[in-house]
Image (cartoon, rainbow, N blue to C red):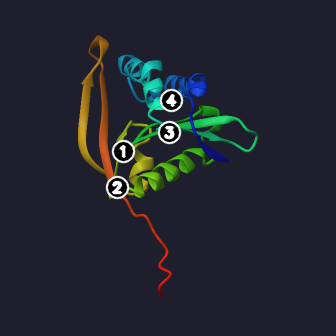
């Protein structure tokens, strides 16, 4: 498994991973209006903007299939998705480890907005809820999510002992 920086030529696979994961997983947690909001939020233009800022990464498995993506902006983890057929194989953990380590080099705190499906994962990794949000979507549906954070703990070996 490897993680690499995304390029503009990767747009279609990033969009596919994001849209397919939302369409498959989120309807079990959110009403239709909220699912549509997520899909529209992670649109092609937003993905392109993030690729151009060099903050989108791809996870490739041993068979060279792109199975997941994560976006890292400053000290925030965004757009972390693993294709449904590859979930449960450690790819999400690897992407999250990578994002946390990357952020830890420059920041003391890591932030993430958690969807309902991912919240338990983040709680188990030491994230704390700091704010609860609701967004009214079409048909008066609501998208609910938590802003979360945790301390960044970059461990640098001490070679002076």
Is the C-beta separation of discs 2 and 1 under 8 Å?
A: yes
Mark 3 / mark 2, whichever is N-terminal: 3
Q: What residue is at 42 percent from the left and 24 percent from the top?
A: 46
Is the C-beta separation of discs 1 and 4 under 8 Å?
A: no
Is the C-beta separation of discs 3 and 1 under 8 Å?
A: no
Residue extending furthest toward the right: 63
- Provide residue 54's location: percent of width, then percent of height: 48, 37
Mark 4 / mark 2, whichever is N-terminal: 4
Task: Choose mark 3 or mark 2, whichever is in front.
Answer: 2
**Callout 2: 10 Å neighbours few (<14), some, many (20+)?**
some
- Provide residue 37's location: percent of width, then percent of height: 37, 20
Q: To which residue does mark 3 refer?
A: 70
Mark 2 / mark 1, whichever is N-terminal: 1
Mark 1 / mark 4, whichever is N-terminal: 4
Q: To which residue does mark 4 refer?
A: 25
Task: Choose mark 3 or mark 4, whichever is in front.
Answer: 3
Nearest to the observer: residue 55 or residue 140: 55
In whole angstroms, how far apart are the C-alphas of marks 3 and 4? Answer: 17 Å
Q: What residue is at 39 percent from the left and 22 percent from the top?
A: 41
């Amino acid at each position: 498994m490897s993680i690499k920086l995304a390029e503009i030529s990767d747009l279609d696979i990033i969009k596919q991973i994001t849209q397919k994961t939302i369409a498959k997983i989120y309807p079990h947690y959110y009403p239709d209006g909220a699912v549509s909001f997520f899909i529209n939020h992670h649109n092609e233009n937003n993905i392109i903007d993030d690729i151009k800022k060099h903050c989108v990464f791809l996870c490739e498995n041993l068979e060279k299939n792109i199975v997941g993506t994560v976006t890292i902006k400053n000290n925030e983890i965004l757009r972390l998705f693993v294709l449904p057929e590859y979930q449960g194989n450690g790819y999400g953990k690897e992407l999250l480890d990578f994002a946390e380590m990357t952020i830890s080099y420059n920041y003391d705190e890591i932030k993430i907005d958690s969807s309902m499906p991912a919240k338990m994962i983040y709680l188990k990794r030491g994230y704390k809820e700091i704010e609860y949000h609701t967004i009214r979507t079409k048909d008066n549906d609501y998208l609910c999510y938590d802003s979360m954070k945790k301390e960044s703990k970059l461990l640098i070996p001490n070679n002076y002992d």
